[in-house]
Amino acid sequence: MPVKVKPHQKFREIYQVTLEDGAQRLATRNLTPGRSVYGERLVKFKGVEYRVWDAFRSKLAGAIIKGVQNVPIEPGDKVLYLGAASGTTPSHVSDIVGETGHVYCVEFAQRSIRDLINNVAAYRTNISPFLEDARFPEKYAMFIPGKVDTIYCDVAQPEQAKLLADNADVLLKPSGWVMLAVKAQSIDVTMAPEAVYQQEARVLRKRGFDVKEIVALEPFDKAHAMIVAQKA
């Protein structure tokens, strides 16, 4: 059977692909046709090229497949991405926000930022990479015009929710949204992952967020969850 693509029933600029063998995958419309970022498959449907989105490589894709109800990333949005690594998920976020949106990528590891610049940002005008430590938002805030709509945080730090809230204090617009990919093992290996998720959610509530949902990411990522919250 031929490949079929249809819009996701809930989220704008996210698509559902049915492959030749009937397997279902997520995808985004490729902002840079002909270019793959991390070896993902490119498929064409009705003259448009889409990038198959690997949920085992991207916690955001995993959260969508696991049924997250809120993905506060839409066309035209400005997104601050903390822990951008080499750009796998940021490239899909870049596809979603499109040419009228922008993704500000913060990454501390020099090798990762080099890959992000050479493989992704060089071809996408809506990505700005910063080699900075996400614990110190004042170091890159001056390079981000105005406030962002959403902050997406995927960092292997002990105080993940605090780091996210500190960035939100400086850079998030009123009533803006945050997505926090919690790595339980980076916070406390002795605690049950579920207890860690609740602990991080409490930190966000204390910092003025309304926590909308906590979605566990197994089988895509072990001992990880996605917390989605809105500034109250």
Image (spheres, rainbow, N blue to C red):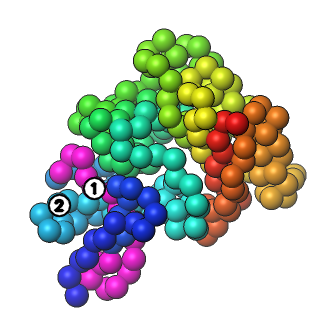
Callout 1 crowding tier (Cα within 10 Å): few <14, some 14–19, many ≥20? many
Point 17% across, 60% down: residue: 48
Furthest residue toward left: 47
Q: Residue furthest right?
A: 190
Left or right: 117 as drawn, with respect to 197? left
Secondary structure at numbered mark 1? strand
108 or 66, which lies in front? 66
Report the residue marked by disc 2: 48
Pick the front one: 48 or 105: 48
| Residue 111 visible in the picture | no
Tell me the residue at 29%/59% (across/down): 51
Quarter of the image with the C terminus is top right
Disc 2 marks which amino acid? Val
As for residue 20 lying within the magenta part, the answer is yes
Left or right position of 155 against 185? left
* Residue type (three-letter) at the residue carrying disc 1: Arg
Query: Is 205 located above or below residue 28 in the figure?
Result: above
Q: Is residue 11 left or right of residue 201?
A: left
Give me the residue at 37% from left, 27% from top.
128
Magenta-colored stretch includes residue 130? no
Q: Is residue 32 left or right of residue 132?
A: left
In the rendered image, which residue does mark 1 sit on?
Answer: 29
Labels 1 and 2 touching (C-beta < 8 A): yes
Give neighbour class at mark 2: few <14, some 14-19, many 20+ (Cα, 10 Å): few
Read off the magenta span. Answer: 18-33
Where the N terminus falls, by quadrant? bottom left
**Which quarter of the picture shows residue 26?**
bottom left
Tell me residue 136's x, y (percent). 63, 18
Residue 13: x and y, percent? 35, 55
- Residue 174 in the image: above or below residue 6: above
Q: Nearer the viewer, residue 130 or 4?
A: 4
Q: Position of residue 91 (x, y in %)?
A: 36, 45
